[in-house]
Image: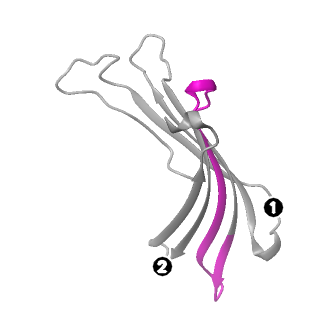
Amino acid sequence: MFRDNYFTTGIPFNQPINQKTADAKFQTSIRQRLTKSILSFNTFLDVTYTQKSFWDIYRTSLPFPDNNFNPGLSIGKPIIRNNQLKGIAIFSFEHKSNGRDSIDSRDWNYFSFSFTHFFNMRFSAEAKAWAGWIDKKENLR
């Protein structure tokens, strides 16, 4: 698992259930290591993918009015002290898009660096910084 995986829907209590008052949202996310071997500097390479979709499940044709696609590539380094995993540092490149073309297209790219410190088996803290850019002027509207 990479990010949260979920499916959620809801209905209004004070209105009838119809195509304008209720829908569903779900997200699927994976992380897959690309190599079995450890790379230089004790690092590893991962590919990531997250998809978030909004689904009009109460309409006859069950359309998806919006989908967000988020593939990425990351290199990570575990921080090990006294034979214990104390943290992990990850540098990533990600692309986020709605998958459409022309004037309906919405996308951007970003690099990020995150560090997670494991205090114990149940408690950790993460800091993340990112810098992004937009390729097309149409995305600025």
> Looking at numbered disc 1 in the image, what kind of residue is underneath it?
Lys
Q: Chief secondary structure of the magenta span?
A: strand
Q: Is residue 138 left or right of residue 21?
A: right
Residue hosting label 1: 36
Task: Point out the stretch of residues depicted in magenta.
Answer: 77-105
- Element carrying mark 2: loop
Asked if the stretch drawn in magenta spans residue 44, the answer is no
Using the rendered image of the protein, determine whether residue 1 is visible from the camera's viewpoint: no
Using the rendered image of the protein, determine whether residue 63 is visible from the camera's viewpoint: yes
Q: Is residue 126 above or below residue 74?
A: below
Q: CA distance from mark 2 to mark 1?
A: 27 Å
Please name whichever residue, 7 or 71, is drawn nearer the observer in this view of the structure: 71
Q: Is residue 3 left or right of residue 122?
A: right
Asked if the stretch drawn in magenta spans residue 96, the answer is yes
Q: Pick out the residue farthest to the left.
A: 14
> Looking at numbered disc 2 in the image, what kind of residue is underneath it?
Phe
Label number found at residue 119: 2
Please name whichever residue, 19 or 104, is drawn nearer the observer in this view of the structure: 104
* Image coordinates for residue 7, horizontal then vertical, percent: 45, 37
**Residue for point 48% across, 79% down:** 119
Q: Is residue 50 above or below residue 34?
A: above
* Image coordinates for residue 124, horizontal then vertical, percent: 47, 72
Q: Is residue 11 above or below residue 3?
A: above
**Residue for point 50% across, 49% down:** 4
Crowdedness of circle 1 by 10 Å Cα count: few (<14), some, many (20+)? few
- Element carrying mark 1: loop
The image quarter in which residue 15 lies: top left
